[in-house]
Amino acid sequence: MSHRSFNYEFGNTVNSLRISHLVALSLQAVTLFLESDRIGLFNFLIVFTVVALNVFLSGKRWYEQIDGRYDVQQLTSVQDWGLRAQYALALFGAVFLALLAHLVTPIIPAGMASFLYHLSDYGSIALGFTILGVELFEGIRSRVR
């Protein structure tokens, strides 16, 4: 009998990461909404649309419990470029949208709101990369087996 100090199950890990990602995105959206009068309507709408798209994409993958390992396997084996684009969007979409929201974010003047927004912004980016890394690792690992 071997000693395991870390119990890793792909489904539970990805589910927890996706819930954390949705919490970070929700905090980002709420903070952005609270500061919408200071940053202007146009700036608010651009960033809020990107965050809302990320919530939709990440929320759909969490709610439907979509297995990213399958997306990785299909991405590497399908020959049709249209299908490859769909699988790539599913895998890399959350990271792309998190980075896009970070790049188009205007300056938020309030101190605490700015801190909360940027904390959730960087958390969203980090969680997006973490989910992507786990799904890529497990997808490639199961393909090699």
Image: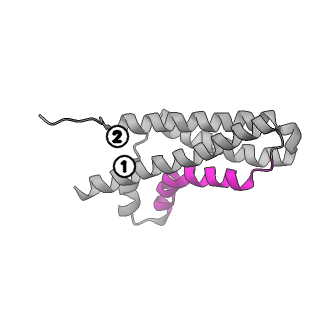
The percent position of residue 23, horizontal first and vertical second, equals: 59, 33
Q: Which residues are magenta?
A: 82-107
The percent position of residue 144, horizontal first and vertical second, equals: 25, 58
Q: Residue at x 82, y 48 (%)?
A: 43
Tag 1: residue type?
Arg
The percent position of residue 19, horizontal first and vertical second, equals: 51, 33
Tell me if 117 is positioned left or right of 141 in this view.
right
**Which marked residue is nearer to the observer: mark 1 or mark 2?**
2
For disc 1, the neighbor class at 10 Å (few under 14, some 14 to 19, many from 20) is many
Q: Is residue 23 visible?
A: yes
Cα distance in 3D space between marks 1 and 2 = 10 Å
Q: Which mark is residue 108?
A: none
Tag 2: residue type?
Phe
The image quadrant that residue 9 belongs to is top left
What scheme was used to colour the molecule? Answer: one colour
Residue 119 forms part of the magenta stretch: no
Mark with earlier residue (1, 2): 2
Q: Which residue matches tag 1?
A: 69
Name the residue furthest left.
1
For disc 2, the neighbor class at 10 Å (few under 14, some 14 to 19, many from 20) is some
Residue contact at pointers 1 and 2, CB within 8 angstroms: yes
SS at circle 1: helix
Q: Residue at x 84, y 43 (%)?
A: 109
The percent position of residue 75, horizontal first and vertical second, equals: 41, 59
Q: Which residue matches tag 2?
A: 10
Q: Main secondary structure of the magenta part?
A: helix
